[in-house]
Image (cartoon, coloured by chain):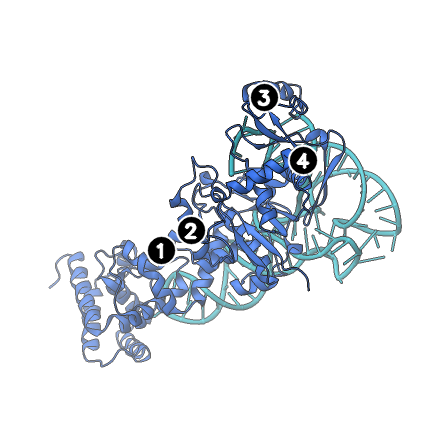
Chain colours: A blue, B cyan
RNA sequence: GACCCCGUCGUCUAGCCUGGCCAAGGACGCGACCCUUUCAAGGUCGAGAUCGCGGGUUCGAAUCCCGCCGGGGUCACCA
């Protein structure tokens, strides 16, 4: 029986979860789920300056909202780097004792000068090894560096990129532990991945160049290297790495914009990965089909329009009752009372599902269900509030008053009958009604709206529109 | 600048490993039409890539090889 795969996602809580990070998490998650592996969540919070508990909560919240659940990680202790300092220290000491690492007393200022000079010469800066054999005593302030052979090369065997060769002339003795005693990122990552028994490191392309350094560290530590899979970055429309200046980039931002979680999950999965011609995937389908072999190598441009198409698709597909539940906060934000009658709200949602790309749009479009129109849109008014409008409203009101029930089919029959009597098309009466009920030229089917609004409210709005139309036309008698 | 990665419709991509089924398929977006009480949704059709460019190999290349160009990433006692 093969060892189960173990993968991880290691965000640093220095901001909200970025969609790029979310996609990395999603690929790892899907990889693990698809082969009954383990998905570990590790928090890289060694940057005390920028890490906050608030952001940590936000990141966990975003992952949970997306449906990316982890098998190991917070709140279980031991998965935050700040809790693991002792582990790093022990590994560093071992490397030092075995001669794989050495103390360095070069000052940052001195190194900076060398770096500038190297770059001026058009060379990659490389630590010259000043302290490599200097035997710097522990009593002096010092950093700890990893000893790397001057000659030779390090090969990174990437699952996606194949063999990537790095000459040692490009590598240098990098710092494992800073002078202040804190371990560096690259060192923590290696120690963490080793001690957490990670088998596959799936992470952003931007880490590929750092990988040979890490491979050297694995070797020094005497551990086998995990499999690496470097996935391409996500770009903005200008082909530059997606960042805040491209607008909304955090998972929370999309959530607040009313993008449904199924859509963001689906979109992120398909960005850089494919399964034939299939575009729509549920979370389960992604877990079932995901494979590294079909992850692309080219960076992908984030396309909000397609995301919104998927959001609309999922809104159409999701159960109305479920959406009604999710719509609550968006209604409140739109200044509308979230109704206690959930069944009624679900009916409202049913009429809006096919015409909303986001929950924000849906809440906005639902306004007229909660309050009578305050204003009437100018364009449809100009077109339909003709001289005959008031009398047509009157006929409509009279007919409706004598009509029992709000069955859509019966209402349509009533409208068609009246339209025929008046020598009009259905659309004329329908639009007059639509203006009265919603204040707009476009809305869900009016016969369904009447059913949801109720006969009394419908009549009230028709009468209000009749009066408004009369006023608008001057003073009729 | 050095090193590394990448390069198929505007965008996401299938195909590339195992050359011919590809005069390149799907999706978003765009246009038209149909349906229709409006808007959507849905349906049908259409425009849109000579597969970054140039050489080769081959009977045959998007698919293999070489060069070039373009884009991105990494070069910290940041993560």
The answer to whether residue A167 of the structure is visible from this angle is: yes
Q: Which residue is mark 4?
A: A98
Q: Which residue is mark 1?
A: A360
Q: CA distance from mark 2 to mark 4?
A: 50 Å
Disc 1 versus disc 4: nearer the observer: 4
Residue situated furthest left in the rendering: A477
Give the letter of the chain under mark 1.
A
* Residue at horizontal 59 percent and vertical 43 percent from the top: A191
Q: Quadrant of the N terminus of chain A?
A: bottom right
> Could you say which disc has been placed on residue A106 in the image?
3
Q: CA distance from mark 3 to mark 4?
A: 22 Å
Crowdedness near tag 2: few (<14), some (14–19) or many (≥20) residues, C-alpha within 10 Å: some
Comes first in the chain, label 3 or label 1: 3
Residue closer to the observer: A399 or A46: A46
Q: CA distance from mark 2 to mark 1?
A: 11 Å
Residue A406, x across and y down, in percent: 27, 77
> Could you say which disc has been placed on residue A53 in the image?
none
Disc 2 versus disc 4: nearer the observer: 4
Give the letter of the chain under mark 3.
A
Instruction: Classify B40 as above or below A10.
Output: below
The answer to whether residue A425 of the structure is visible from this angle is: no
A338 displayed left or right of A118: left
Crowdedness near tag 1: few (<14), some (14–19) or many (≥20) residues, C-alpha within 10 Å: many
Q: CA distance from mark 3 to mark 1?
A: 57 Å
Comes first in the chain, label 1 or label 4: 4
Look at the numbered disc 4 and give the secondary structure of its residue.
Answer: loop
Comes first in the chain, label 3 or label 4: 4
Q: Tell me whether the residue at label 2 lies in contact with that at label 3, contact meaning CB atoms closer than 8 angstroms.
A: no
Tell me which corner region of the image, top left, top right, bottom left or bottom right, holds residue A369: bottom left
Tell me which corner region of the image, top left, top right, bottom left or bottom right, holds residue B69: top right
């Amino acid at each position: 029986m093969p060892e189960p795969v173990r993968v991880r996602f290691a965000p640093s809580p220095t901001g909200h979860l970025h969609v790029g990070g979310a996609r990395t998490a999603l690929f790892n998650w899907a990889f693990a789920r698809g082969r009954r592996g383990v998905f570990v969540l590790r928090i890289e919070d060694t940057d005390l300056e920028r890490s906050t508990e608030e952001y940590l909560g936000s990141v966990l919240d975003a992952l949970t909202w997306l449906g990316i659940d982890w098998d190991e990680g917070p709140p279980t202790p031991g998965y935050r780097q700040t809790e693991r300092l002792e582990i790093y220290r022990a590994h560093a000491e071992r490397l030092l004792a075995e001669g794989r690492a050495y103390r360095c007393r070069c000052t940052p200022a001195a190194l900076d000068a060398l770096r500038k000079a190297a770059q001026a010469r058009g060379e990659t800066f490389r630590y010259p090894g000043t302290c490599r054999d200097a035997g710097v005593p522990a009593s002096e302030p010092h950093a700890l560096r990893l000893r790397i052979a001057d000659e030779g090369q390090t090969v990174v065997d990437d699952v996606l990129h194949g063999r990537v060769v790095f000459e040692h002339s490009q590598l240098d003795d990098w710092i494992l532990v800073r002078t202040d005693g804190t371990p560096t990122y690259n060192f923590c990552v290696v120690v963490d991945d080793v001690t957490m028994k990670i088998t596959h490191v799936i992470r952003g392309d931007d880490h590929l160049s750092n990988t040979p350094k890490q491979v050297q560290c694995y070797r020094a530590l005497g551990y086998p290297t995990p499999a690496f899979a470097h996935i391409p970055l996500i770009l903005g429309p200008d082909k530059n790495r997606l960042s805040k200046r491209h607008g909304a980039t955090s998972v929370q931002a999309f959530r607040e914009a009313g993008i449904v979680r199924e859509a963001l999950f689906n979109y992120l999965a398909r960005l850089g990965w494919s399964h034939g011609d299939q575009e729509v995937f549920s979370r389960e389908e992604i877990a079932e089909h995901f494979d590294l072999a079909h992850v692309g190598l080219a960076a992908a441009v984030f396309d909000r329009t397609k995301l919104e198409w998927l959001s609309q698709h999922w809104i159409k597909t999701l159960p109305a009752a479920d959406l009604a539940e999710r719509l609550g906060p968006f209604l409140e934000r739109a200044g509308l009372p979230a109704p206690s009658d959930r069944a009624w709200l679900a009916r409202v949602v049913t009429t809006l599902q096919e015409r909303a790309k986001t929950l924000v749009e849906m809440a906005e479009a639902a306004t007229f269900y909660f309050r009578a129109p305050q204003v009437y849109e100018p364009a449809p008014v100009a077109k339909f509030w003709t001289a005959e409008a008031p009398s047509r409203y009157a006929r409509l009101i009279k007919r409706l008053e004598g009509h029992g029930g709000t069955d859509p089919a019966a209402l349509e029959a009533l409208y068609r009958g009246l339209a025929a009597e008046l020598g009009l098309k259905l659309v004329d009466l329908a639009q007059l009604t639509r203006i009265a009920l919603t204040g707009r030229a476009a809305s869900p089917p009016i016969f369904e709206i009447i059913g949801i609004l109720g006969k009394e409210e419908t009549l009230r709005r028709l009468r209000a529109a009749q009066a408004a139309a009369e006023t608008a036309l001057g003073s009729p008698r």
